[in-house]
Image (cartoon, rainbow, N blue to C red):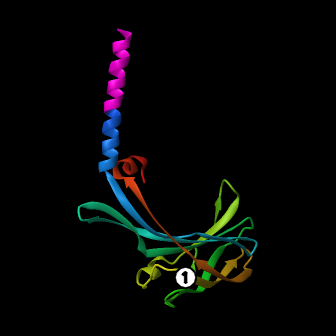
């Protein structure tokens, strides 16, 4: 009798496991991720982080579900510091395509007033070039990024530094399940 109960339970688990595997296989979507590596560096007694955020488009190609993350991109410049500051400004930002020579000039952008990260006691400001990049022709290639970072102090002081980095492509593909992504909130 105990043996029958264990056998029934094993059969039940096996059926649910097979259904779960089939659900995972048939609900998968291919993701083509045209991302860029994040840049982190020390600057003006703080840290600069340059992040390129890709836009996601859900498509169907020949009956297959596909998601493409890429253009139009948002470009975020973040500044973190233990020293309190009022705001940041990024001026004269120029992206130059390493392979194509494509030049993209973006006008200055100013952050809102700096906020504090409660867990680290660091102040931060974020500048976004999202709306400016949407109308530009951004090819997927490495880009040299040059600009001026201005940090405005609480006392009216101004610190300024030029920066020059290279945005490096980070293309990859992966498969994800829409149902699991929905449950996980991705």
Q: Residue at x 76, y 72 (%)?
A: 45
Snapshot quadrant of residue 91: bottom right
Q: Position of residue 106 (x, y in %)?
A: 52, 86
Label 1, on which residue? 143
Q: Residue at x 32, y 20 (%)?
A: 8
Q: Position of residue 112 (x, y in %)?
A: 58, 72
Q: Is residue 76 above or below residue 4?
A: below
Q: Main secondary structure of the magenta part?
A: helix
Judge whether residue 13 is colored magenta.
Answer: yes
Quarter of the rendering occupied by the N terminus: top left
Q: In front: 186, or 101?
A: 101
Q: Residue at x 39, y 62 (%)?
A: 31
Task: Report the magenta residues as a range.
Answer: 1-15
Furthest residue in direction top, as rendered = 1
Q: In front: 57, or 129?
A: 57
Q: Is residue 2 above or below residue 123?
A: above
């Amino acid at each position: 009798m105990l043996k029958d109960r264990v056998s029934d339970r094993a059969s039940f688990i096996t059926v649910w496991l097979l259904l779960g595997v089939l659900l995972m296989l048939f609900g998968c979507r291919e993701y083509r991720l045209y991302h860029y590596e994040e840049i982190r560096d020390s600057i003006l007694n703080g840290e600069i982080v340059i992040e390129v955020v890709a836009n996601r488009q859900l498509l169907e190609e020949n009956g297959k579900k596909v998601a493409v993350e890429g253009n139009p991109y948002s470009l975020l410049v973040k500044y973190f510091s233990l020293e309190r500051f009022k705001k940041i400004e990024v001026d004269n930002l120029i992206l130059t395509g390493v392979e194509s020579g494509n030049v993209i000039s973006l006008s200055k952008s100013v952050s809102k007033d700096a906020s504090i990260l409660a867990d680290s006691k660091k102040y931060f400001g974020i500048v976004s070039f999202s709306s400016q990049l949407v109308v530009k022709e951004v090819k997927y290639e490495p880009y040299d990024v040059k600009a001026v970072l201005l940090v405005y102090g609480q006392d009216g002081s101004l610190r300024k530094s030029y920066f020059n980095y290279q945005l490096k492509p980070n293309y990859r593909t992966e498969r994800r399940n829409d149902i699991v992504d929905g449950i996980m909130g991705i």
